[in-house]
Image (tube, grey):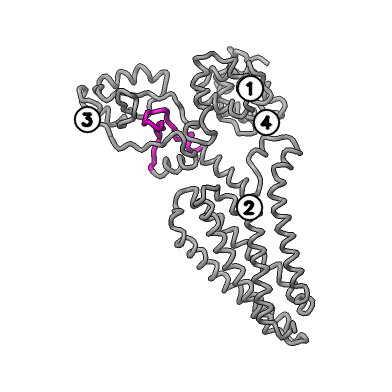
Amino acid sequence: MKISQNKNSTPEKDDPKVLVEALRRHPRDRRADFVASLDPRLAGEVLWQADRVSRADVIFRMDNRALATIAEAVPPDWAARFISLLPPKGRKRVLAEISAEKASPIKTLLSYKPDSAGARMSPEVVTFEKDLNVKQTIEKIRETMSLKKVFHCYVVDSKGKLVGVVPLRKLLMAEGETKLEEIMIADVVSVPVEMDQEEVARVATQNMIFALPVVEKSGVLAGVITLDRVLRVIQEEATEDIYKMAGTDKKEITSQSVFTVARIRAPWLFASWMGGLAAALIIGFFEEAIARVAALAAFLPIVLGMGGNIGTQSSTVVVRGLAMGYINVKAVSRTVLREMGIGVLLGVAYGILLGLFAMFRFRGHIPPYGLDLGFTVGLAIFCSMAIAATMGAFVPLLLKKINVDPAIATGPFVTTSIDILGIIAYFVVAIFFLSEHLA
Protein backbone atom coordinates (compact mmCIF):
# COMPACT_ATOMS: atom_id res chain seq x y z
CA MET A 1 0.00 0.00 0.00
CA LYS A 2 1.54 3.29 -1.12
CA ILE A 3 0.82 6.79 0.04
CA SER A 4 -0.09 8.94 -2.95
CA GLN A 5 1.01 12.51 -3.48
CA ASN A 6 -2.31 14.24 -4.18
CA LYS A 7 -1.60 17.20 -6.48
CA ASN A 8 -5.08 17.83 -7.92
CA SER A 9 -6.93 18.69 -4.73
CA THR A 10 -9.72 21.08 -3.89
CA PRO A 11 -10.23 23.03 -0.65
CA GLU A 12 -13.07 20.67 0.29
CA LYS A 13 -10.90 17.61 -0.34
CA ASP A 14 -8.12 19.15 1.75
CA ASP A 15 -10.41 19.81 4.73
CA PRO A 16 -9.51 17.23 7.43
CA LYS A 17 -12.96 17.50 9.02
CA VAL A 18 -14.67 16.59 5.75
CA LEU A 19 -12.22 13.75 5.20
CA VAL A 20 -12.69 12.41 8.74
CA GLU A 21 -16.43 12.21 8.13
CA ALA A 22 -15.79 10.51 4.79
CA LEU A 23 -13.48 8.03 6.53
CA ARG A 24 -16.19 7.20 9.06
CA ARG A 25 -18.66 6.45 6.24
CA HIS A 26 -16.23 4.07 4.49
CA PRO A 27 -16.52 0.30 5.13
CA ARG A 28 -14.04 -0.73 7.82
CA ASP A 29 -11.97 -2.86 5.42
CA ARG A 30 -11.63 0.07 2.94
CA ARG A 31 -10.57 2.79 5.35
CA ALA A 32 -6.85 2.08 5.05
CA ASP A 33 -7.00 2.43 1.24
CA PHE A 34 -8.86 5.73 1.61
CA VAL A 35 -6.22 7.20 3.94
CA ALA A 36 -3.40 5.86 1.77
CA SER A 37 -4.80 7.81 -1.20
CA LEU A 38 -4.23 11.13 0.62
CA ASP A 39 -1.15 13.30 0.86
CA PRO A 40 0.96 11.98 3.82
CA ARG A 41 0.63 15.14 5.91
CA LEU A 42 -3.12 15.33 5.28
CA ALA A 43 -3.47 11.61 5.98
CA GLY A 44 -1.76 12.15 9.33
CA GLU A 45 -4.12 15.00 10.23
CA VAL A 46 -7.13 12.88 9.32
CA LEU A 47 -5.88 10.04 11.53
CA TRP A 48 -5.22 12.48 14.37
CA GLN A 49 -8.78 13.83 14.26
CA ALA A 50 -10.48 10.49 13.59
CA ASP A 51 -12.23 8.47 16.28
CA ARG A 52 -10.35 5.59 17.90
CA VAL A 53 -12.19 2.88 15.93
CA SER A 54 -11.51 4.45 12.53
CA ARG A 55 -7.89 5.11 13.44
CA ALA A 56 -7.38 1.52 14.58
CA ASP A 57 -8.98 0.18 11.38
CA VAL A 58 -6.44 2.12 9.33
CA ILE A 59 -3.36 1.45 11.46
CA PHE A 60 -3.84 -2.33 11.63
CA ARG A 61 -4.49 -2.67 7.88
CA MET A 62 -1.84 -0.29 6.53
CA ASP A 63 1.58 -1.66 5.62
CA ASN A 64 4.72 -0.54 7.47
CA ARG A 65 6.15 1.63 4.71
CA ALA A 66 2.92 3.57 4.18
CA LEU A 67 2.51 4.14 7.93
CA ALA A 68 6.14 5.23 8.21
CA THR A 69 5.62 7.76 5.40
CA ILE A 70 2.74 9.33 7.34
CA ALA A 71 4.74 9.28 10.59
CA GLU A 72 7.60 11.20 8.96
CA ALA A 73 5.20 13.86 7.64
CA VAL A 74 3.51 14.71 10.96
CA PRO A 75 4.70 15.95 14.38
CA PRO A 76 6.36 13.22 16.50
CA ASP A 77 3.58 13.22 19.12
CA TRP A 78 1.00 12.50 16.40
CA ALA A 79 3.14 9.70 14.99
CA ALA A 80 3.70 8.20 18.46
CA ARG A 81 -0.05 8.19 19.08
CA PHE A 82 -0.69 6.22 15.88
CA ILE A 83 2.16 3.77 16.33
CA SER A 84 1.29 3.13 19.99
CA LEU A 85 -1.83 1.26 18.82
CA LEU A 86 0.38 -1.45 17.32
CA PRO A 87 1.82 -4.37 19.29
CA PRO A 88 5.55 -4.07 20.24
CA LYS A 89 6.80 -6.04 17.21
CA GLY A 90 4.65 -3.94 14.88
CA ARG A 91 6.06 -0.73 16.37
CA LYS A 92 9.63 -1.90 15.78
CA ARG A 93 8.90 -2.73 12.15
CA VAL A 94 7.37 0.70 11.48
CA LEU A 95 10.13 2.59 13.33
CA ALA A 96 12.74 0.69 11.27
CA GLU A 97 11.23 2.30 8.14
CA ILE A 98 11.57 5.84 9.56
CA SER A 99 14.77 7.89 9.35
CA ALA A 100 16.86 7.97 12.55
CA GLU A 101 16.34 11.72 12.99
CA LYS A 102 12.54 11.41 12.82
CA ALA A 103 12.37 8.15 14.77
CA SER A 104 14.33 9.39 17.80
CA PRO A 105 11.65 11.71 19.33
CA ILE A 106 8.93 9.15 18.49
CA LYS A 107 10.83 6.44 20.40
CA THR A 108 11.21 8.82 23.35
CA LEU A 109 7.47 9.43 23.47
CA LEU A 110 6.72 5.71 23.16
CA SER A 111 9.03 5.02 26.11
CA TYR A 112 6.66 6.80 28.51
CA LYS A 113 3.67 5.03 30.06
CA PRO A 114 0.73 5.18 27.58
CA ASP A 115 -1.55 7.37 29.72
CA SER A 116 1.13 9.67 31.15
CA ALA A 117 1.91 13.33 30.52
CA GLY A 118 5.08 12.32 28.69
CA ALA A 119 3.14 10.21 26.19
CA ARG A 120 0.63 13.03 25.62
CA MET A 121 2.98 15.99 25.27
CA SER A 122 4.37 17.60 22.16
CA PRO A 123 8.19 17.66 22.40
CA GLU A 124 8.40 20.44 19.81
CA VAL A 125 8.54 23.32 22.27
CA VAL A 126 10.57 26.50 21.76
CA THR A 127 12.63 27.57 24.77
CA PHE A 128 14.27 30.92 25.57
CA GLU A 129 17.28 31.45 27.80
CA LYS A 130 16.71 33.84 30.68
CA ASP A 131 19.48 36.29 29.64
CA LEU A 132 17.78 37.05 26.29
CA ASN A 133 16.13 40.45 25.99
CA VAL A 134 12.66 41.14 24.62
CA LYS A 135 13.90 42.18 21.17
CA GLN A 136 15.99 39.03 20.75
CA THR A 137 13.09 36.90 21.94
CA ILE A 138 10.67 38.38 19.40
CA GLU A 139 13.19 37.76 16.62
CA LYS A 140 13.53 34.13 17.70
CA ILE A 141 9.76 33.73 17.71
CA ARG A 142 9.58 35.10 14.16
CA GLU A 143 12.22 32.61 13.04
CA THR A 144 10.59 29.58 14.62
CA MET A 145 6.88 30.39 14.25
CA SER A 146 6.72 28.89 10.76
CA LEU A 147 8.11 25.59 12.06
CA LYS A 148 6.74 25.34 15.59
CA LYS A 149 3.87 26.89 17.52
CA VAL A 150 4.77 29.33 20.28
CA PHE A 151 2.11 29.61 23.00
CA HIS A 152 4.21 31.15 25.77
CA CYS A 153 7.84 32.04 26.19
CA TYR A 154 9.19 29.27 28.35
CA VAL A 155 12.33 30.56 30.05
CA VAL A 156 15.11 28.06 30.83
CA ASP A 157 18.55 28.21 32.38
CA SER A 158 21.78 27.00 30.77
CA LYS A 159 20.92 23.37 31.64
CA GLY A 160 17.45 23.55 30.07
CA LYS A 161 15.57 23.64 33.38
CA LEU A 162 12.28 25.52 33.35
CA VAL A 163 12.66 28.64 35.52
CA GLY A 164 9.81 30.86 34.34
CA VAL A 165 7.28 31.80 31.71
CA VAL A 166 6.50 35.05 29.90
CA PRO A 167 3.01 35.41 28.35
CA LEU A 168 3.16 36.77 24.80
CA ARG A 169 1.02 39.79 25.74
CA LYS A 170 3.44 40.74 28.50
CA LEU A 171 6.36 40.25 26.11
CA LEU A 172 4.90 42.63 23.51
CA MET A 173 4.22 45.29 26.13
CA ALA A 174 7.80 45.27 27.49
CA GLU A 175 10.74 47.42 26.39
CA GLY A 176 13.08 45.88 23.81
CA GLU A 177 16.16 45.78 26.05
CA THR A 178 14.39 44.26 29.05
CA LYS A 179 15.77 40.84 30.06
CA LEU A 180 13.35 37.92 30.18
CA GLU A 181 14.31 37.09 33.77
CA GLU A 182 13.09 40.57 34.78
CA ILE A 183 9.56 40.08 33.46
CA MET A 184 9.08 36.32 33.71
CA ILE A 185 6.63 34.62 36.07
CA ALA A 186 8.80 32.39 38.22
CA ASP A 187 5.95 30.39 39.77
CA VAL A 188 5.18 28.18 36.77
CA VAL A 189 2.43 25.55 36.85
CA SER A 190 3.96 22.43 35.29
CA VAL A 191 3.48 18.66 35.43
CA PRO A 192 6.05 15.83 35.57
CA VAL A 193 6.35 13.46 32.60
CA GLU A 194 5.15 10.49 34.68
CA MET A 195 1.88 12.14 35.86
CA ASP A 196 -1.29 10.32 34.81
CA GLN A 197 -3.17 12.04 31.99
CA GLU A 198 -6.35 12.31 34.07
CA GLU A 199 -4.47 14.29 36.71
CA VAL A 200 -2.92 16.42 33.95
CA ALA A 201 -6.40 17.31 32.65
CA ARG A 202 -7.46 18.24 36.19
CA VAL A 203 -4.44 20.55 36.66
CA ALA A 204 -5.03 22.22 33.29
CA THR A 205 -8.75 22.83 33.85
CA GLN A 206 -8.35 24.01 37.44
CA ASN A 207 -5.70 26.55 36.43
CA MET A 208 -7.29 27.45 33.06
CA ILE A 209 -3.99 26.96 31.22
CA PHE A 210 -3.94 26.92 27.41
CA ALA A 211 -0.54 25.19 27.25
CA LEU A 212 0.82 23.16 30.16
CA PRO A 213 4.62 22.60 30.32
CA VAL A 214 5.86 19.07 31.04
CA VAL A 215 9.18 18.60 32.87
CA GLU A 216 11.57 15.74 33.58
CA LYS A 217 12.48 14.79 37.17
CA SER A 218 15.54 17.08 36.90
CA GLY A 219 13.28 20.03 36.00
CA VAL A 220 14.33 20.10 32.33
CA LEU A 221 11.50 21.18 30.03
CA ALA A 222 10.52 18.11 27.98
CA GLY A 223 7.46 19.33 26.11
CA VAL A 224 4.05 20.95 26.34
CA ILE A 225 0.44 19.73 26.48
CA THR A 226 -2.01 22.04 24.72
CA LEU A 227 -5.73 22.57 25.28
CA ASP A 228 -6.82 20.36 22.38
CA ARG A 229 -4.93 17.44 23.91
CA VAL A 230 -6.41 18.16 27.34
CA LEU A 231 -9.93 18.07 25.88
CA ARG A 232 -9.13 14.81 24.11
CA VAL A 233 -7.86 13.35 27.40
CA ILE A 234 -11.04 14.39 29.20
CA GLN A 235 -13.15 12.73 26.50
CA GLU A 236 -11.10 9.54 26.53
CA GLU A 237 -11.04 9.31 30.34
CA ALA A 238 -14.81 9.79 30.49
CA THR A 239 -15.26 7.05 27.87
CA GLU A 240 -12.91 4.75 29.77
CA ASP A 241 -14.83 5.33 33.01
CA ILE A 242 -18.12 4.51 31.29
CA TYR A 243 -16.70 1.21 30.04
CA LYS A 244 -15.34 0.35 33.48
CA MET A 245 -18.70 1.16 35.05
CA ALA A 246 -20.26 -1.35 32.67
CA GLY A 247 -17.64 -3.96 33.53
CA THR A 248 -15.85 -3.94 30.18
CA ASP A 249 -12.84 -2.23 28.59
CA LYS A 250 -12.20 0.45 25.96
CA LYS A 251 -10.23 -2.12 23.93
CA GLU A 252 -13.59 -3.59 22.98
CA ILE A 253 -14.35 -0.80 20.51
CA THR A 254 -11.22 -1.49 18.45
CA SER A 255 -11.70 -5.25 18.33
CA GLN A 256 -13.71 -6.98 15.63
CA SER A 257 -13.33 -10.42 17.18
CA VAL A 258 -16.38 -11.79 18.99
CA PHE A 259 -14.12 -14.05 21.07
CA THR A 260 -11.88 -11.15 22.11
CA VAL A 261 -14.86 -9.06 23.25
CA ALA A 262 -16.30 -12.07 25.10
CA ARG A 263 -12.95 -12.57 26.87
CA ILE A 264 -12.90 -8.90 27.93
CA ARG A 265 -16.42 -9.05 29.37
CA ALA A 266 -16.16 -12.49 30.95
CA PRO A 267 -14.34 -11.62 34.24
CA TRP A 268 -16.89 -8.99 35.27
CA LEU A 269 -19.81 -11.18 34.30
CA PHE A 270 -18.27 -14.00 36.33
CA ALA A 271 -18.18 -11.64 39.32
CA SER A 272 -21.89 -10.92 38.77
CA TRP A 273 -22.60 -14.63 38.41
CA MET A 274 -20.78 -15.40 41.66
CA GLY A 275 -22.62 -12.57 43.39
CA GLY A 276 -25.95 -13.84 42.10
CA LEU A 277 -25.07 -17.33 43.28
CA ALA A 278 -24.23 -15.96 46.75
CA ALA A 279 -27.51 -14.04 46.79
CA ALA A 280 -29.42 -17.20 45.84
CA LEU A 281 -27.74 -19.12 48.67
CA ILE A 282 -28.61 -16.38 51.17
CA ILE A 283 -32.25 -16.33 50.01
CA GLY A 284 -32.28 -20.11 50.31
CA PHE A 285 -31.13 -19.78 53.90
CA PHE A 286 -34.33 -17.79 54.60
CA GLU A 287 -36.50 -20.20 52.60
CA GLU A 288 -38.60 -21.13 55.64
CA ALA A 289 -39.40 -17.46 56.35
CA ILE A 290 -40.55 -16.96 52.75
CA ALA A 291 -42.66 -20.12 52.92
CA ARG A 292 -44.44 -18.92 56.07
CA VAL A 293 -44.87 -15.29 54.90
CA ALA A 294 -45.04 -15.55 51.11
CA ALA A 295 -45.57 -11.78 50.73
CA LEU A 296 -41.90 -11.28 51.64
CA ALA A 297 -40.92 -12.60 48.20
CA ALA A 298 -43.18 -10.07 46.48
CA PHE A 299 -41.30 -7.09 47.91
CA LEU A 300 -37.75 -8.42 47.55
CA PRO A 301 -37.21 -7.10 43.96
CA ILE A 302 -38.21 -3.52 44.83
CA VAL A 303 -36.08 -3.48 47.98
CA LEU A 304 -33.03 -4.68 46.05
CA GLY A 305 -33.78 -2.50 43.00
CA MET A 306 -34.05 0.73 44.99
CA GLY A 307 -30.88 -0.08 46.92
CA GLY A 308 -28.98 -0.84 43.72
CA ASN A 309 -30.21 2.34 42.03
CA ILE A 310 -29.24 4.73 44.82
CA GLY A 311 -25.92 2.91 45.27
CA THR A 312 -25.15 3.44 41.58
CA GLN A 313 -26.17 7.11 41.82
CA SER A 314 -23.89 7.73 44.80
CA SER A 315 -20.90 5.92 43.31
CA THR A 316 -21.32 7.65 39.93
CA VAL A 317 -21.44 11.10 41.54
CA VAL A 318 -18.36 10.38 43.66
CA VAL A 319 -16.41 8.81 40.76
CA ARG A 320 -17.00 11.81 38.49
CA GLY A 321 -16.34 14.19 41.38
CA LEU A 322 -12.97 12.56 41.97
CA ALA A 323 -12.20 12.63 38.24
CA MET A 324 -13.08 16.32 37.87
CA GLY A 325 -11.36 17.34 41.10
CA TYR A 326 -14.29 18.82 43.03
CA ILE A 327 -14.31 15.95 45.55
CA ASN A 328 -11.20 15.63 47.69
CA VAL A 329 -10.15 12.09 48.53
CA LYS A 330 -9.00 13.38 51.93
CA ALA A 331 -12.54 14.50 52.82
CA VAL A 332 -13.84 10.93 53.18
CA SER A 333 -16.11 11.53 56.16
CA ARG A 334 -17.79 14.62 54.68
CA THR A 335 -18.52 12.95 51.34
CA VAL A 336 -19.73 9.69 52.88
CA LEU A 337 -21.92 11.45 55.44
CA ARG A 338 -23.47 13.58 52.70
CA GLU A 339 -24.41 10.54 50.61
CA MET A 340 -25.54 8.67 53.71
CA GLY A 341 -27.83 11.59 54.56
CA ILE A 342 -29.30 11.48 51.07
CA GLY A 343 -29.82 7.72 51.40
CA VAL A 344 -31.52 8.13 54.78
CA LEU A 345 -33.80 10.91 53.53
CA LEU A 346 -34.87 9.01 50.40
CA GLY A 347 -35.08 5.77 52.39
CA VAL A 348 -37.55 7.34 54.80
CA ALA A 349 -39.68 8.67 51.93
CA TYR A 350 -39.81 5.42 49.97
CA GLY A 351 -40.05 3.35 53.17
CA ILE A 352 -43.26 5.17 54.10
CA LEU A 353 -44.68 4.77 50.59
CA LEU A 354 -43.85 1.06 50.36
CA GLY A 355 -45.00 0.43 53.94
CA LEU A 356 -48.39 2.02 53.28
CA PHE A 357 -48.78 0.06 50.05
CA ALA A 358 -47.91 -3.24 51.77
CA MET A 359 -50.21 -2.50 54.70
CA PHE A 360 -53.27 -1.80 52.53
CA ARG A 361 -52.45 -4.48 49.95
CA PHE A 362 -52.34 -7.25 52.57
CA ARG A 363 -54.90 -5.83 54.99
CA GLY A 364 -57.33 -8.51 56.23
CA HIS A 365 -55.08 -11.42 55.24
CA ILE A 366 -54.97 -14.45 57.52
CA PRO A 367 -52.84 -14.31 59.61
CA PRO A 368 -53.41 -10.54 60.10
CA TYR A 369 -49.94 -9.19 59.32
CA GLY A 370 -50.89 -6.14 57.19
CA LEU A 371 -49.54 -3.56 59.65
CA ASP A 372 -46.56 -5.71 60.63
CA LEU A 373 -45.68 -6.41 57.00
CA GLY A 374 -45.99 -2.74 56.05
CA PHE A 375 -43.64 -1.70 58.85
CA THR A 376 -41.19 -4.49 57.95
CA VAL A 377 -40.85 -3.78 54.22
CA GLY A 378 -40.78 -0.03 54.88
CA LEU A 379 -37.91 -0.39 57.35
CA ALA A 380 -36.17 -2.88 55.05
CA ILE A 381 -36.14 -0.55 52.04
CA PHE A 382 -34.95 2.26 54.30
CA CYS A 383 -32.02 0.12 55.52
CA SER A 384 -31.23 -1.07 51.99
CA MET A 385 -31.13 2.46 50.54
CA ALA A 386 -29.13 3.91 53.44
CA ILE A 387 -26.55 1.11 53.26
CA ALA A 388 -26.31 1.27 49.45
CA ALA A 389 -25.82 5.06 49.38
CA THR A 390 -23.13 4.84 52.03
CA MET A 391 -21.31 2.01 50.25
CA GLY A 392 -21.65 3.76 46.90
CA ALA A 393 -19.81 6.77 48.29
CA PHE A 394 -17.27 4.97 50.48
CA VAL A 395 -15.99 2.35 48.01
CA PRO A 396 -14.80 4.82 45.27
CA LEU A 397 -13.02 6.91 47.91
CA LEU A 398 -11.36 3.81 49.34
CA LEU A 399 -10.25 2.65 45.88
CA LYS A 400 -8.85 6.08 45.09
CA LYS A 401 -6.98 6.05 48.40
CA ILE A 402 -5.21 2.80 47.48
CA ASN A 403 -4.49 4.00 43.90
CA VAL A 404 -7.10 1.84 42.16
CA ASP A 405 -9.33 3.41 39.50
CA PRO A 406 -12.57 4.29 41.37
CA ALA A 407 -14.63 3.84 38.18
CA ILE A 408 -14.83 0.11 38.90
CA ALA A 409 -16.88 1.01 42.01
CA THR A 410 -20.00 1.18 39.84
CA GLY A 411 -19.20 -2.11 38.12
CA PRO A 412 -20.98 -5.43 38.57
CA PHE A 413 -18.84 -6.52 41.52
CA VAL A 414 -19.82 -3.62 43.79
CA THR A 415 -23.47 -3.47 42.71
CA THR A 416 -23.79 -7.20 43.39
CA SER A 417 -22.22 -6.66 46.82
CA ILE A 418 -24.83 -4.00 47.56
CA ASP A 419 -27.55 -6.47 46.54
CA ILE A 420 -26.22 -9.07 48.96
CA LEU A 421 -26.15 -6.55 51.82
CA GLY A 422 -29.71 -5.54 50.89
CA ILE A 423 -30.91 -9.14 51.03
CA ILE A 424 -29.34 -9.68 54.44
CA ALA A 425 -30.80 -6.44 55.80
CA TYR A 426 -34.25 -7.32 54.40
CA PHE A 427 -34.50 -10.74 56.01
CA VAL A 428 -32.90 -9.70 59.31
CA VAL A 429 -35.57 -6.99 59.65
CA ALA A 430 -38.29 -9.46 58.60
CA ILE A 431 -37.25 -12.11 61.12
CA PHE A 432 -37.07 -9.53 63.91
CA PHE A 433 -40.46 -7.87 63.31
CA LEU A 434 -42.43 -10.82 61.92
CA SER A 435 -41.16 -13.35 64.42
CA GLU A 436 -44.66 -14.21 65.67
CA HIS A 437 -45.79 -15.08 62.12
CA LEU A 438 -42.63 -17.11 61.44
CA ALA A 439 -42.91 -19.26 64.59
Q: Is residue 90 left or right of residue 29?
A: left
Name the residue that disc number 3 marks. Answer: 182
Q: Are marks 3 and 4 in contact (CB under 8 Å)?
A: no
* Residue 218 image offset from top left, x and y in percent: 37, 31
* Residue 381 image offset from top left, x and y in percent: 63, 71
Name the residue that disc number 2 marks. Answer: 411
Tell me which amino acid carries mark 1.
Val
Judge whether residue 366 is colored magenta. Answer: no
* Residue 209 image offset from top left, x and y in percent: 39, 38
Question: Nearer the N terminus, badge 2 or badge 4?
Answer: 4
In the figure, residue 385 lies in which quadrant?
bottom right
Q: Are marks 1 and 4 in contact (CB under 8 Å)?
A: no
- Disc 3 from disc 1: Cα separation: 49 Å
**Along the line of sight, the residue nearer the viewer: 332 or 237:** 332
- Disc 2 from disc 4: Cα separation: 33 Å
Tell me which amino acid carries mark 3.
Glu
Can you tell which of label 3 and label 1 is closer to the viewer?
3
Q: Secondary structure at mark 1?
A: helix
Q: Which mark is residue 35?
A: 1
Can you tell which of label 2 and label 4 is closer to the viewer?
2
Q: Residue at x 22, y 30 (%)?
A: 182
Question: Nearer the N terminus, badge 3 or badge 1?
Answer: 1
Question: Which residues fall within the magenta stretch?
Answer: 207-231
**Along the line of sight, the residue nearer the viewer: 89 or 12:** 89
Tell me which amino acid carries mark 4.
Arg
Name the residue that disc number 4 marks. Answer: 25
